[in-house]
């Protein structure tokens, strides 16, 4: 058991420290009770995809592959040093949108993500929360910047595929539509016939919050560490948990 699984009281800590209030559990309860459709970001809320397969190494490998093709100048120094492979992919797409180069780079990233599923670490409490939400009649979808192939493989490995199928909305060849664009959120809502106000998006990054906000969907932030929590709150997230255990506990009551 990780230390994250033990931090069950921290749902109130962020807001109490900042405002001196203790109203975040009420906000969390309100979000859960209003959710008929739950949209999950994948890498973070469902699992740590790159727990055993370094995202930094993947980003460096993508940059090195571009350099091996004589495209060293395609990335700025900051982009080459990025720890996020999606950052590298977006950078190339901005300069060569829809190109064969971008398609090949995206496929290379997908293959790395597929390899990462073998060592991905389930987010504490995510599996039982997914099963419980399904059992009480809510419908679930994944809205992610990862490849939908990767999501389906991971969910199948955990026996969770039926909880989401067929509602997996991930990265397409149109990389400009990655979150923070709300494209994948709109796809999920439209396919499920759901009004934005009846949905809830669980995400761990400001891009998730911005996509939810653009689509008019309530947002629950999940932050496995203080850095991620600060990024979410600085972006405007008002309800952030550092464990999914309080969500599961409220849902079971």
Image (spheres, rainbow, N blue to C red):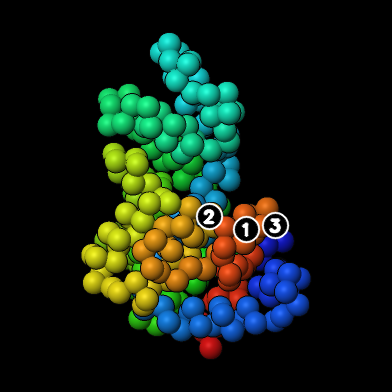
Dot 2, how many residues are within 10 Å of its Cα: few (below 14), some (14-19), or many (20+)? Answer: many
Q: Residue at x 38, y 32 (%)?
A: 94
Q: On the image, numbered disc 1 is attached to which residue?
A: 234
Q: Residue furthest top?
A: 70
Q: How many marks?
A: 3
**Where is 150 relative to 108, above or below?**
below
Spatial distance from mark 2 to mark 1, Cα to Cα?
A: 9 Å
**Where is 4 relative to 12, above or below?**
above
Q: On the image, numbered disc 3 is attached to which residue?
A: 226
Q: Earlier in the sequence, mark 1 or mark 3?
A: 3
Q: Are marks 2 and 1 in contact (CB under 8 Å)?
A: yes
Q: Residue at x 35, y 42 (%)?
A: 176
Between marks 1 and 3 in the image, the one whose residue lies nearer the viewer: 1
Q: Residue at x 53, y 54 (%)?
A: 205
Q: Residue at x 41, y 50 (%)?
A: 179
Q: Position of residue 151 (x, y in %)?
A: 38, 51
Considering the numbered disc 2 on the image, is that residue within a helix, a strand or a loop?
helix
The circle on residue 206 is: 2
Q: Earlier in the sequence, mark 2 or mark 1?
A: 2
Q: Is residue 161 visible?
A: no
Quadrant position of residue 56: top right
Q: Residue furthest bottom?
A: 253
């Amino acid at each position: 058991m990780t230390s994250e699984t033990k931090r069950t009281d921290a749902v109130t800590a962020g807001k109490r420290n900042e405002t001196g209030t203790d109203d975040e559990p009420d906000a969390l309860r309100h979000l859960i009770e209003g959710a008929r459709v739950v949209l999950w970001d994948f890498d973070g809320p469902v699992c740590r995809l790159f727990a055993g397969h370094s995202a930094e190494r993947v980003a460096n490998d993508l940059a090195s592959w571009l350099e091996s093709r004589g495209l060293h100048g395609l990335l700025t120094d900051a982009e080459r040093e990025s720890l996020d492979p999606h950052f590298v992919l977006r950078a190339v797409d901005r300069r060569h949108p829809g190109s064969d180069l971008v398609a090949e780079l995206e496929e290379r990233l997908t293959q790395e993500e597929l390899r990462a599923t073998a060592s991905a670490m389930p987010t504490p409490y995510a599996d039982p929360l997914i099963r419980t939400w399904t059992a009480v009649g809510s419908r679930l979808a994944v809205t992610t910047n990862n490849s939908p192939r990767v999501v389906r493989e991971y969910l199948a490995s955990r026996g969770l595929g039926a909880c989401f199928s067929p509602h997996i909305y991930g990265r397409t060849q149109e990389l400009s539509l990655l979150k923070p664009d709300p494209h994948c959120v709109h796809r999920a809502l439209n396919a499920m016939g759901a009004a934005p106000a009846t949905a809830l998006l669980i995400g761990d990054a400001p891009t998730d919050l911005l996509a939810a906000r653009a689509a008019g969907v309530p947002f629950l932030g999940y932050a496995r560490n203080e850095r991620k929590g600060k990024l979410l709150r600085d972006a405007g997230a008002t309800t952030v948990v550092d464990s999914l255990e309080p969500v599961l506990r409220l849902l079971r009551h």
